[in-house]
Image (cartoon, grey):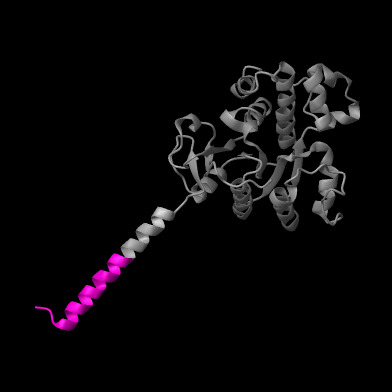
Amino acid sequence: MLGKKATFAAMRCMALMVCFFIVAMSVCAQHLPAYQIYNDQGKRVSFAKMVRKLTTKDIILFGEIHDNPIDHWLQLELVKALHEKGDLILGAEMFESEDQEVLDSYLRGDLKWINQATSIDLWPNYATDYAPLVEFAQRNGLPFIATNVPDRFAKEVYFSGFSALDSVQSDDLRYLAPLPIPFDKQLKTYQDIFELWPDHASDELIMAQALRDATMAHLILTNFKAYHLFLHINGTYHSEWYEGILWYLMQYRDDLTYATIATVEQASVRPLSDEYKGVANFIICVDEEMTETH
């Protein structure tokens, strides 16, 4: 039989175990996962595994929800991780192709900062969400490519269709994808526009979106270098279902390897809803009540 001291020690140990179990259960009950990464089949994957898979590609399209803080945090972490693996080129929808000269001046150190005083029409969340990526590029000597079409051309196409591009001055053609723009109105993501905004959608609106997608694809490829990895940041719509920018990349260069990341929102981040399976190679599922950056 156990002595009094041994019995007391055993009881004390048991009490501690019970307390630990109660605390552990309480912590688990209060755990609120903010996001979960999935592969295209809806299987959970770690950030590290996603990075390993992405480093085997030539070009990555990171589809974000523009005001989602999880996206912007993961983008910066992904840039850091990919930079450690090899030569990296960055690009983003948030800068128009006309902005490249100013952007390059900042990257070289000739310009002290990028703000509203420069000629770039910055997005309202630039300082919090995109400046960290640009600053990382500057500190580490990485190229950062402005890929979006100048907004004035997209507006002209929205009002008049592709015929509006017939009058573009020769000096301005460098800011656009080569003309004529390949166009397939039947792509799922373009057809979704008609379903989402039936009162506002038009063929011309789809053409304007196609102009953006084609120009981003063209400028990604123009600035891509062999044995480098190009990470491009864009709205998730522009690369979902392997369409948008990726569709144009495949039209222009089907010999390169590509990967896409999409962002979706759900009431619970686990499991991934069937409707989102296959939307991209990797899917970041974020709690739909996540705070917004602007």
Magenta residues: mostly which secondary structure? helix
Query: Looking at the image, which is closer to me, 185 or 104?
Result: 185
142 w.r.t. 195: above or below: below
> Which residue sits at x=8%, y=78%?
1
**Residue 71 horizontal side relative to residue 139, left or right:** left
> Which residue sits at x=81%, y=17%?
160
Give percent across and percent down for residue 198: 65, 18
Give percent across and percent down for residue 293: 66, 47
The quadrant where residue 42 appears: top left
Give percent across and percent down for residue 125: 72, 46
281 w.r.t. 36: above or below: above
Q: How many marks?
A: 0
The quadrant where residue 217 appears: top right
Query: Looking at the image, which is closer to me, 35 or 213?
Result: 35
**Residue 200 horizontal side relative to residue 46, left or right:** right
Query: Looking at the image, which is closer to me, 181 or 8?
Result: 8
129 w.r.t. 253: above or below: below
Q: Quadrant of the C terminus?
A: top right
> Which residue sits at x=71%, y=16%?
203
Give percent across and percent down for residue 29: 39, 53
Q: Report if residue 134 lies within the magenta region.
A: no
Q: Report if residue 17 lies within the magenta region.
A: yes
Q: Which residue reaches farthest left?
A: 1
Q: Which residues are drawn in magenta?
A: 1-19
